Image (cartoon, rainbow, N blue to C red):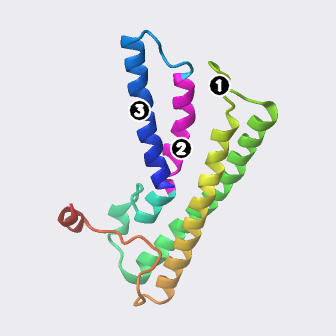
Amino acid sequence: MNAVSAIAIFGVMLLGVAQVFGRKFLNLPIPGYIDFIEQSMVVFAFFGIAYCQRLGGHVRMDLFMAKFRGRTLYFFEALATLIGLFVITTLIETSWLHFLRAYEFGDSTIDIQLPIWPAKLIIPLSFVVLWVRFAVQTIGFTRLFLFPDAQVIAVPVIEDVEEQARHE
């Protein structure tokens, strides 16, 4: 999904170049350009979210979590991931209802009347993938809480500032 997101960004870039050249040199803008951009933004905004969670690249309370080690760290990580699982479960339900509403009413964009429901369907599907990621990480952190000396599997390894600088 992250690769599809990257391809969508590249496609938006090409579409933008075509829009600028078409408007400037041929006086021929792309009809519905803004509608296409609005629809594609959902792809690159939501398709990469589970991958970001996998890497631990999301906004975290590192200052708070860096003070803990071992079981205490894994307990708070499991708790935070469980809270995220609860929140994403609620978001899946509500985004699915928004998709159904757009599909049933035939909601469309203003300019060229593109249907909005495909973009709204991407959101709950991406959230389902994120839900699976949260579930895997909750199991992984719970396992590490119970067996702190076990091999780290299925959870992001959070690096301190020095380790991040070394890798960069």
Q: Closest to the observer: 30 or 84?
A: 30
Q: Quadrant of the C terminus?
A: bottom left
Judged from the image, the secondary structure of the residue bearing numbered disc 3 is: helix
Could you tell me residue 85's position as x and y percent?
60, 63
- Residue 134 lies within the magenta run: no
- Sequence-wise, the earlier of marks 2 and 3 is 3
Q: Which mark is residue 109?
A: 1
What is the chief secondary structure element of the magenta stretch?
helix
Q: Which mark is residue 43?
A: 2
Residue 92 is left or right of residue 133, and the answer is right
Which residues lie in the magenta part? 33-49
The CA span between labels 1 and 3 is: 21 Å
Q: Which amino acid, mark 1?
A: Thr
In this view, 123 is above or below 56: above
Could you tell me residue 159's position as x and y percent?
29, 68
Q: What is the residue that sits farthest to the top in this orientation?
A: 27
Q: Which residue is labeled 3 in the image?
A: 14
Neighbour tally class for label 3: few under 14, some 14-19, many 20 plus, Cα within 10 Å: few
- Sequence-wise, the earlier of marks 2 and 1 is 2
Q: Closest to the observer: 69 or 104?
A: 104
In this view, 68 is above or below 44: below
Q: Residue at x 45, y 37 (%)?
A: 11
- Residue 38 lies within the magenta run: yes
The CA span between labels 2 and 1 is: 16 Å
Q: Residue at x 47, y 75 (%)?
A: 154
The CA span between labels 2 and 3 is: 16 Å
